[in-house]
Each structure stands twice: as C-alpha cells, then as structure tokens.
Image (cartoon, helix red, strand yellow):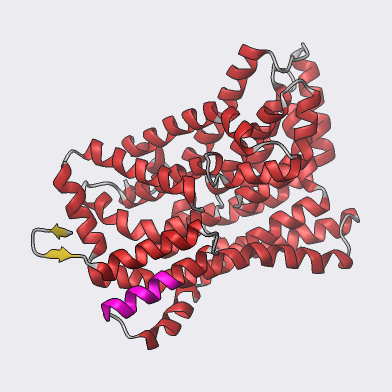
Amino acid sequence: MLWGTLNQSVELGWDFYLPVILFVALIAMAVPVWAAIGTAAIVMLVMSGDLPLSLVGESLFTGIDAFALTAVPLFILTGDVLVRTGLSRKFLDVAEALTCFTKGGFGSATVLVCGMFAAISGSDAAGAAAVGRMTINRLVESGYPRPYACALVAAGACTGILIPPSIAYIIIGLVLGISASTLFLAALIPGLAILLSILITNLIVNRIYLYEGGGVMTFGEWLANLGKALKSGWYAFIVPGIIFYGIFSGRLTPTEAGATAVVVTIVMGFIMRTLTLADFPSMLVSSAKVNGVILPIIAFSAPLAEALAIMGVPQGFVASITALTDDPYVLILLMIGILIAAGCVMETTPNIVILAPILKPLADNIGMNEIQFCIMMITALGVGFITPPLGLNLFVVSGITGESILKIAARAVPFVLTMLIVVLLIAYVPAVSTTLLPAIYQ
C-alpha cells in the first residue's frame, strides 16, 4: 500500500503488516496486551531494521520514567483506601439525600456516587466494583430489573476516566506532551456532561417503565434530610476537595494531589477506626495489581511508537484518510468511529498509546485544538466500557452479580446513545472542552 503526502510517499510492506497481524492474533488468543504490544514492536523493529534492538531496553525504561506517572498508583490506592474506610458509603448517603425527592431517586443517587468516586480514584473499573457492591441489590429492591441495575452502574462508572482527576488523561498527556493539569481542567465540563446525560437517561427510562417510585416531600423535609446526611458524612468530601482545589488552583501537581489524598484518606481511616495496619498489605497488593496492568503497556508501547514514527505511519495515515475526503466534519466522524470501535475491543491505555500519536496529526491537519482532541478521544473511548465484546465495566458488574454480560449490554444501549451525543458535542463544539482554559488554548 502506498500512502502519499505533499512532500513524500510512504510505502508500507510486510515489516508493518505482519507485526499488526501478529498483534491482532495475540490479542485474539487472550495474550496480555503488554506482551502483544511488545512482541509486535520487536518484530517490527527486526523486520524494518529502523532501530537497533539494543535500544529497546532503554526505550522501555524511558517510556515510564516520568514524574506524572507517579500519580497513577497514588489515585488507584486512594480509591482502594476510600472503599476500605467506608467513606464511599458516606458519598452514597449524601447522593441519596440529594435525589430522594424525585422518581428514580436511588437510581440517580447511584449515578451521582459514581461521579463522586470518579473524582477521587480516576479509575472506572474500581468505581464499577465499589459502587456496584453498594447499590445493585438496593436498586433491585427498589424495583429495577437486575440487568438494568447492572447497566446503570456500568454506565455511571464510565465517568471514572472522564471526570478529573483521571488516569487516562495523565497517560494521554504523557504520550502527547500535554500538561495533565490542563487536561483535567478541560475535562471538567465534558465529564459532568456525560454524568448529566446518564442521569437524564435513567430518569426518562424510569418514567417510561416505572421501575422506581418517589416519595413526595416538601422542600423543608428535603433540606432537613440533606442536612442530616451532610452532618454525618461531610468529612468524606475533604478528599475530593483537596484534589480539586490543589490541582485547579495550581498549588499541587496531580502527583502531589494524589499523594496528599492518600495520606489524608489513611489518617481519616485511622481516626474513624475503620482502617488498621493489618489492612495495608492487602491494600498495597490490590493497588499494585491494577498498576501492574497499566505500566507495562505504557513501557512496551514506547518502542512501538518509535518504530511507527520512523516508518512514517502517522503521516501516511493522515494522507490516506484525507485522500478519501477533506471535509473536516466527515474526518471527525471517522476518528470517532475508529475510537469507538477500538474501545469495543481493547482497553483504554493501549488505545491511547497506540492511537493518539496516529490520530493526532489528522486532528492537527483539520485544525482541531489539541486539548479538544484529547477530550474527544478519551470520551469516545469511554463509551467502549459499556459496549461488547470487551466492555470492561460490563465484565466487572457481571463478575460481582453473576448477571449475563449480553443482558447488561442490551440494557446499556440508551446510555451508549446519550453518551455518543455528548461525544459529538465535544467533537464539533470546541467551547465544550476549552471554555475553562486560558485564552492560549481556545
């Protein structure tokens, strides 16, 4: 295949296609993603001869030798401590008090607590597991069918990578050389828009099928109920308050905010006597397992990215796509389609490190703001968490409930559709992701 550009042509042969085929085959055989990426990278380098294999080891360590990545295990650990100390239940109590006056109140509370958890952990799988254990049985008792209850939690937990602080934005910032703090600020409105879309969808579905009724209460009763919940659980909001204030005021980097959140959450656990020293080994092992999935993918993606860059694949991809059409609106739709399809079959981290360097030149070519591109990419990939065949959140809630993944996926369709509307808004309306940014980014 020949990819032409204005100044050069890029001809790709088996030194490109064979590693790609090998990568797809390894993924299909359930080989760990980091191993599949590493194998494809090494085969590509050997066949092309573009980069000495002696530099692969150096490239692996260079890829993860970044201060920003330290924030990843810290946010993961914060989420784990949050669950073990019982602070996550305080979030649910406040969320339920906020929404108890409406029909579908507990369903709305479930979505809100997913957003609250996302504002601390930065991980949607952790949010799906933590919130699912607290709410799914109660949702069923409230009248929701179990598959729909699972779908609601899975959709709400998608905010884990969409509402800052988010591990996904840390990674894409590292890959593309963009400040994570800037991406966090830009993601605030889009993340809340996704949360709102899920809330509205649940209210509409509940209104149609009458899953859950709602008690009638006066404003005074609602205010008293909310005041009681806040009085007994206000301290739980210290942690997200520290993270948001520290990052958005510029006083703390994401890494420093993550470290501070870990320390504060642990201290609060000791004060509440819901955390002991005996809990630390299991907490650290649990967080290390999650972190151990992410970092090897980033490390082995570095030599692959170098090989693709040397072979001119990103530039060739841009030339190939723009040869089909030069309409920016169509090109944006193509990018969204690629991202959603990729999100359906692979996790966010490998998608970011593989696709971001390839799609970014295309976004630049049509004049898309780099911040807008990052927000669009992460949000589109987030839809993949509730779409088969991979749909990580579907597997998480299925694992804790035993419900069929296909049944959950079928009930998640309305949420997918409304999330796609938000993705399109982000893609075609730059102000959605740049309003809160300094003028230099707008």
Q: Is residue 412 above or below residue 43?
A: above
Q: Position of residue 358 (x, y in %)?
A: 31, 58
Q: Position of residue 73 (x, y in %)?
A: 63, 65
213 or 5: which is nearer to us? Answer: 5
166 or 359: which is nearer to us? Answer: 359
Residue at far bottom of view: 54
Residue 45 within the magenta-colored segment of the rendering:
yes
Q: Is residue 204 above or below residue 433?
A: above
Q: Is residue 411 above or below residue 41?
A: above
**Any part of residue 178 in sight:** no
| Residue 148 left/right relative to 352 | right
Seen at 37% across and 61% down, the residue is: 21
| Residue 408 left/right relative to 236 | left
239 or 159: which is nearer to us? Answer: 159
Instruction: Report the quarter where the N terminus lies.
Output: bottom left
47 or 334: which is nearer to us? Answer: 47
Q: How many marks?
A: 0
Instruction: Report the quarter where the C terminus lies.
Output: top left
State the predominant SS element of the stretch in magenta.
helix
Residue 18: quadrant of the picture: bottom left
Seen at 73% across and 56% down, the residue is: 80
**Any part of residue 365 in sight:** yes
Residue at far left of view: 7
Seen at 58% across and 69% down, the residue is: 70
Residue 251: quadrant of the picture: bottom right
Q: Is residue 234 above or below residue 298?
A: above
Q: Position of residue 397 (x, y in %)?
A: 68, 42
Seen at 70% across and 58% down, the residue is: 78
Q: Which residues are magenta?
A: 39-49
Residue 225 within the magenta-colored segment of the rendering:
no
| Residue 165 left/right relative to 89 | left
Q: Position of residue 165 (x, y in %)?
A: 56, 52
